[in-house]
Amino acid sequence: MTTQTPSQPARILLKLSGEQFEGAREYGIDPQFVNKLAQELAQTMAETGAQLVIVVGGGNIMRGASVAANGVERATGDYMGMLATVINGMALVDILEQNGVPARLQTRIHINTVAEPYIRRRGIRHLEKGRVVVVAGGTGNPYVTTDTAAVTTALELECDMVLKATKVDGVYDKDPAKHADAKKHTSLNHRTVLTDPDINVMDNAAISLAMDNQLPIVVFDLLTAGNITRVIQGENIGTRVE
């Protein structure tokens, strides 16, 4: 992680699931949602000065574990899912730049026609120049989720925290959609997240890696306008895991 000084901007990693790209649709990419998100990210960067890394999922197009359960070999399914993340990354970078935000797409699987290969030092240089760095392709390996890719990327690019965007306003002790008495956690530690089966933040590999490197994770509601800015500015939004 970076050691911030008063003159040094925060460096934040935002983890977006593929499902969020669906917006109001049931499949694929909703351009209206991505455009709205791009506008909010532009405002966030202007108001906070933060440097922004985004790791994208691909579940809106292809989820490797799902196709593997229906006859496709698991490794092949995971590579298909990685390709889906590249499609989402291409859409996000294009719409960010249409909204005046310079952005670069890097991918851990080589598709040189549409994206740069992921190179750590190049990514850091892009951030220092004020560009958003969108990282696709997961970790480049099968059997690993994009949650783990997000934590790995945050550590490699020296980010101060990971923001896990969701459709709910934090982490609850049980599913709030099924239980009216569900209680929201405002803060948790990594070890509790690992050991409590009712708490689902990220997969265990990602949480373990974050714990070993003292990397904070904030789970928050992406659909409430302004939340990204509020989290970066230190407001008590969502659930903080540290």
Image (spheres, rainbow, N blue to C red):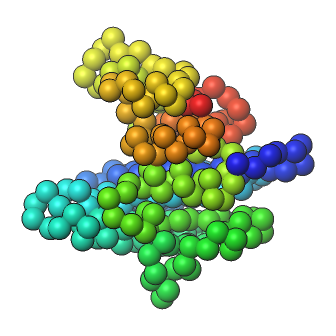
Of the pair 178 and 44, the residue shown nearer to us: 178
Q: Position of residue 44 (x, y in %)?
A: 68, 49
Toward the bottom, the furthest residue is 113
* Residue 68 versus residue 91 in the image, above or below: above
Q: Position of residue 14 (x, y in %)?
A: 56, 50
Residue at horizontal 48%, vertical 72%? 108
Residue at horizontal 78%, vertical 65%? 128
Residue 129 located left or right of residue 72: right
Residue at horizontal 48%, vertical 40%? 207
Of the pair 9 and 224, the residue shown nearer to us: 9
Question: Quadrant of residue 129 in the image?
Answer: bottom right
Toward the left, the furthest residue is 71
Q: Position of residue 92 (x, y in %)?
A: 50, 65
Say whether residue 138 is visible: yes
* Residue 158 versus residue 228 in the image, above or below: below
* Residue 232 versus residue 241 in the image, above or below: below
Q: Quadrant of the C terminus?
A: top right
Residue 197 located left or right of residue 167: left
Q: Position of residue 30 (x, y in %)?
A: 38, 60
Say whether residue 22 is visible: no
Of the pair 90 and 15, the residue shown nearer to us: 15
Question: Quadrant of residue 173 in the image?
Answer: top left
Toward the front, the furthest residue is 212
Residue at horizontal 85%, vertical 50%? 8
Q: How many marks?
A: 0
